[in-house]
Amino acid sequence: MTLLLDTSLWIDFTRARSPASLKQFIAPFVLDPEAHLAEPVRFELLRSARPEESRQLEAQFATLPTLANPADLWQRATILGQACRQIGRTVVSLDLLVAAVALHHNAVLVSFDADFEAIAAVSALRLQRLERPT
């Protein structure tokens, strides 16, 4: 089963101030042999990373295979966004792109982000929505 790890996991996993218990909760997903990366996730994380954070992320990303973007990525994301609006939800554009990649590869999207529930409600997105441990 192909897993696509969303930005929300990576942020909590790599953030210095994240509690050790949260990092331990996320680690099995990052270390799972079925874990994959998507270009929209890579972009979202690296676009504002400081140089040291960028080096750390790139080193971690090098251990994961990347799911290719479908040729019609933007069209798929647009259709997902429109479907979400029809149920009264506005979803962040990058989340639509991530979901489109996951759908294209029939990957299970692993995320803390509740916006993906709206996308799953209007599509065949396989979502493993996590709750942060308390």
Image (cartoon, grey):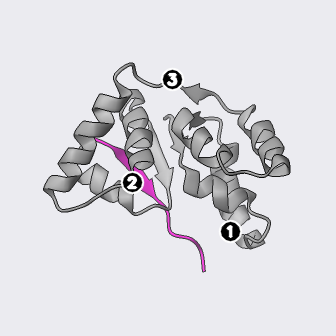
Residue 8: image tag: none
User: What residue would you read off at disc 3?
Assistant: 68
**Residue 2 located within the stretch drawn in magenta:** no
In three-dimensional space, the C-alpha distance between marks 2 and 1, rounded to whole angstroms, equals 24 Å
Give whichever of 28, 47 is nearer the camera: 47
N-term mark: 2 or 1: 1
Q: Please, what is the dominant secondary structure of the magenta stretch?
A: loop
Q: Quadrant of residue 41?
A: top right
Place of residue 54 in the rendered image (x, y in percent of width and height, measured from the top left) = 78, 45
User: What residue would you read off at disc 2?
Assistant: 92
Q: Is residue 83 left or right of residue 25?
A: left
Pair 3/1: label in front: 3
Place of residue 59 in the rendered image (x, y in percent of width and height, measured from the top left) = 80, 38
Pair 2/1: label in front: 2
Place of residue 28 in the rendered image (x, y in percent of width and height, measured from the top left) = 67, 52
Q: Which residue is depicted at the point 59% across and 36% down?
A: 37
Stretch of the chain drawn in magenta = 124-134
Q: Is residue 42 left or right of residue 96?
A: right
Q: Which residue is depicted at the point 39% across and 47% down?
A: 93
Secondary element type, mark 3: loop
N-term mark: 3 or 2: 3
Amino acid type at image mark 2:
Val
Q: Which residue is depicted at the point 65% across and 42% down?
A: 32
User: What residue would you read off at disc 1?
Assistant: 22
Amino acid type at image mark 1:
Leu
Q: Which residue is depicted at the point 37% across and 59% down?
A: 115
